[in-house]
Image: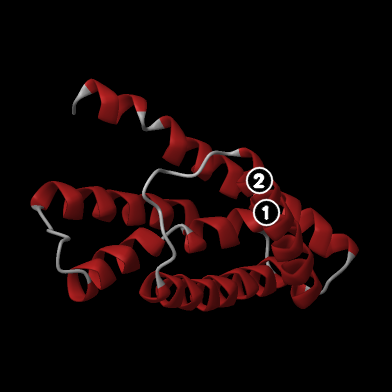
Amino acid sequence: APANARSALWMPWSAALLRALAQVLSKAGLVLWASPFAAGLVGYTVSAAILWTAGTFVPRPTGATFNRRGVAWFALTGVVNGAAVLATYYALASGPVAVVAPVVATYPLFTLALSALLLRRERLNARLVGGVALTVAGVALLLVR
């Protein structure tokens, strides 16, 4: 991979670390207040406030304009993501984070399949499929008792 692509890996690794921390903190919060709906409401409210604040301080990309079709896709994404987070909170409320987190981490399998079906630009290759298979196999190993 080119040097700039390798240096850009800090962003997804940071996202993975933050998502892991969010699941652990969510479990801690659900122990104190066992309400997945409240967890989702508080979490999304705080997330919106952070994004709103960041949006006022971070410069916008040049040439970025309002796009109705983009808004529709992002709104659909919000609905799907909200449902996923709510399902995760329900799972965390009823099960140990050490089991729930690895099961949720199998999403690359679904991402691979859905991207192949829905996105015309996505191309599957043996390396990509192998990487996803290894990820899912690793999760399966974590769940075997």
Secondary structure under the numbered disc 2 in the rendered image: helix
- SS at circle 1: helix
Quarter assignment of residue 139? bottom left
Q: Position of residue 43 (x, y in %)?
A: 73, 61
Q: Are marks 2 and 1 in contact (CB under 8 Å)?
A: yes
Q: Does 24 appear above or below 30?
A: above
- Give above or below for 75 relative to 55: below
Q: Residue at x 58, y 62 (%)?
A: 100
Q: Residue at x 23, y 75 (%)?
A: 118
The disc at residue 28 is none
Task: Give the amino acid type for the residue marked by disc 1 in the picture.
Answer: Trp
The type of residue carrying mark 2 is: Thr
What residue does disc 1 label? Answer: 52
Q: Do we see residue 145 in this rendering? A: no
Residue 87 coordinates in the image, percent (x, y): 60, 75
Return the residue at label 2: 56
Which mark is nearer the camera, 2 or 1? Answer: 2
In the image, taking residue 142 as reference, residue 36 lies left or right, namely: right
Viewer-side residue, 54 vs 84: 54
Q: Residues within 10 Å of mark 1 (few under 14, many from 20)?
A: few
